[in-house]
Image: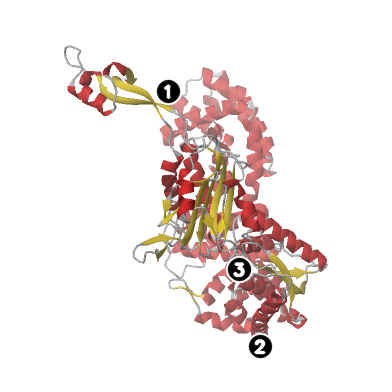
Amino acid sequence: MNALSLKADAAMEPNTAPQGLLIELLTEELPPKSLRMLAEHFAQSVLEGLLARQWIDQVDSQAYRRYATPRRIGLFVKHVRAQGPERERLIKGPSLQVGLDADGKPTQALIKWAERQAAPLQALEQVADGKQTVFAYRHREAGALLDEALEAVLMKALAELPIAKLMQYQLADGQSSVSFVRPVQALVVLHGARIIPVQLLGLQSDRYTQGHRFQGARRIRIDHAEHYEAIMRGEGAVIVDMDERKQEIREALQSHARAANAQLGDEAMTESLLEEVSALVERGAVYAGSFDPDFLRIPQECLMLTMRSNQKYFPLFDAQQRLLPRFLIVSNMTLDDPSLIIDGNERVVRPRLADARFFFEQDQKQSLHARLPQLEQVIYHARLGTQAERAQRVAAIAEWIARQLSLDSLLARRAALLAKTDLLTAMVTEFPELQGLMGRCYALLDGEPEALANALAEQYLPRFAGDALPATALGTVLALADKLETLCGLFALGLLPTGDKDPFALRRQALGVLRMLMEGRLELSLSELVETGLGGLQSRQSHPSAQADLMRFFSDRLTVYLREQGWAQPLVQAVLARPQERLHRVQPRLQALEQFSKQESAQSLAAANRRIGNLLRKQGEAAQGEVDPQCLAEPAEKALWARIGRLKPDLAAALADHKDALALELLAQARPEVDQFFESIMVMTEDVKLRNNRLALLAMLHDMMNQVADLSALG
């Protein structure tokens, strides 16, 4: 910036009317996977600072624009004041006892305090402060000035950015250095047309920035904050809004795919790659490339991974989702003749695909079954042995599950033994993301049953919260067995997750087991599954509380899962207070309990249940006897005994048929007798025989009331 422009900017007086505020940090290339996060955190922190100083009235999506490109993060905020509104402050000082002497005159302590506040003694007030009365000074002070306080807001925003690793770099003076995620080259801070004086990361704020590294102007003057986007798109050849840039690239990809009579394939994978390439370019031009159709003999998963992960290309598919020998490139360069870009990318991808073909051909020289002995050379865990030993444990669990579900246990065992053999292949060694998928491919080439091959591909599902479950029965068996072996093995060693630390992803594994049992409606007992998994470790030293710890861990994860599904905490607590062996019945039980809890009788029975529970806990063994009908002396206890007798067979039948709503309705019918019992019967009578009989009667009622859920948790 030359001396004349500096003088002109310095002469600009702050506009009292709200103006748009522009902030831009021009940097070296930012990490693409962190770009959106950095921009979002920066914007959020700055907006909070503006709001706290009342330079803006509110934050909504229409009030600001967030900017993020590979070489810049920034923010534009509408209607920002140059000064916050005047505000009233009440400053509290000494108490009356300290501020006044015995004659009621101001003490030196009060006089000195008032002088520090620049407050006349006659302007002081007496206000309540908790249990005492204190002197206070009420006055109005000017609002914070944008020019004076914005620098502190920006410094705080930068300090709070979630940067995994800072880069230290030297400033232009050749002596001092600063730290940031990447070196910052320029700082633009404009309020309307005026520069706000800010010094950050060794830079003084200005109105000059740079455009596209190759196709934009080298030096761009931003005359007004509101003109920034248009200037950058025109002179700079940059689309600064990441969402806008992403949408333009999306539309261009879709247009090219339609023109080629093709599709972009899996929506989630396409969206993930689109997010990444949007962070790699400052504007996106889409071009079409192709490769030798002979490469299509390789499993398309290999080709897709090579193109998406290594080259950031978008593979194209036909209507049947078969891979075509074509792909789309998102380039940072917009050219009338893109032939050099297309040719260069085609040359780059060719050796990648050739490598994949070589690995694939080499792997086929040895079957998966022939690789089994090699698992003995691969250590799974120092205290749990080799992958071969682990495969035997997984096979035993898979066999047991298959028998429980009336499936082919021998096929389940073979699937478990072969499950990890694809880890030994060259293809999976090069592309670990293909584990399981290559197992399926090689199993089919080896002539293994299709059900077994599909199970190998599904063994890692679900891989994360919300991921798909295995689609096949054998895949479910193998995925369950694999996750259970991991959980049982590590819990047997006492390697439980603690706090935020979960190095073996055991929480994710446990959630996968729970989801398969619940959503797959599997007739399997969780406790028996755990017992079977731990049973395979008998030859190794096992932590004495492993089974109890693992069951508690599952219960905690189930509680979290159900809460995330939207179930109220009291309902979850009530249901999970009772052992839940068949987890697929938990949510129907919650539904039944939710409906029951809305009835008037539910609260009455819940209160009675709590009262009974407290009595029984205090009396211990005295409440564990049998009911003697001959000792029932009062009409109310006789009526309750009669109701229990009528209720017992009906309740048992409803529970046997898993009709939880009916069971709760039957319990509701006992409310009159329960209420009458507590209104007219003294349980803790001095007659020991009578007291124990009444306690036994209540114990029987308590057990019946809690067979669906712990009703005391309802209110």
Callout 2 crowding tier (Cα within 10 Å): few <14, some 14–19, many ≥20: few
Q: Which residue is mark 3?
A: 214
Label 2 residue SS:
loop
Q: CA distance from mark 2 to mark 3?
A: 49 Å
Identify the amino acid type marked 1. Answer: Asp
Q: What percent of the width, then of the height, locates residue 592?
A: 66, 37
Q: What percent of the width, then of the height, locates residue 287?
A: 73, 70
- Nearest to N terminus: mark 2 or mark 3: 3
Q: CA distance from mark 1 to mark 3?
A: 98 Å
Q: What label sits on residue 687 in the rendered view? A: 1
- Nearest to N terminus: mark 1 or mark 2: 2
Q: Is residue 319 visible?
A: no
Identify the amino acid type marked 3. Answer: Phe
Is label 1 in contact with label 2 (beta carbons under 8 Å)? no
Which residue is nearer to you in this view: 321 or 224? Answer: 224
Q: CA distance from mark 1 to mark 2?
A: 87 Å
On the rendered structure, is 138 left or right of 189? left
Callout 3 crowding tier (Cα within 10 Å): few <14, some 14–19, many ≥20: few
| Image quadrant where residue 94 sits | top left
Residue at figure coordinates x 41%, y 42% from the top left: 148
Q: Which residue is mark 2?
A: 365
Residue at figure coordinates x 16%, y 13% from the top left: 102
Which residue is nearer to you in this view: 396 or 234? Answer: 234
Residue at figure coordinates x 51%, y 43% from the top left: 47
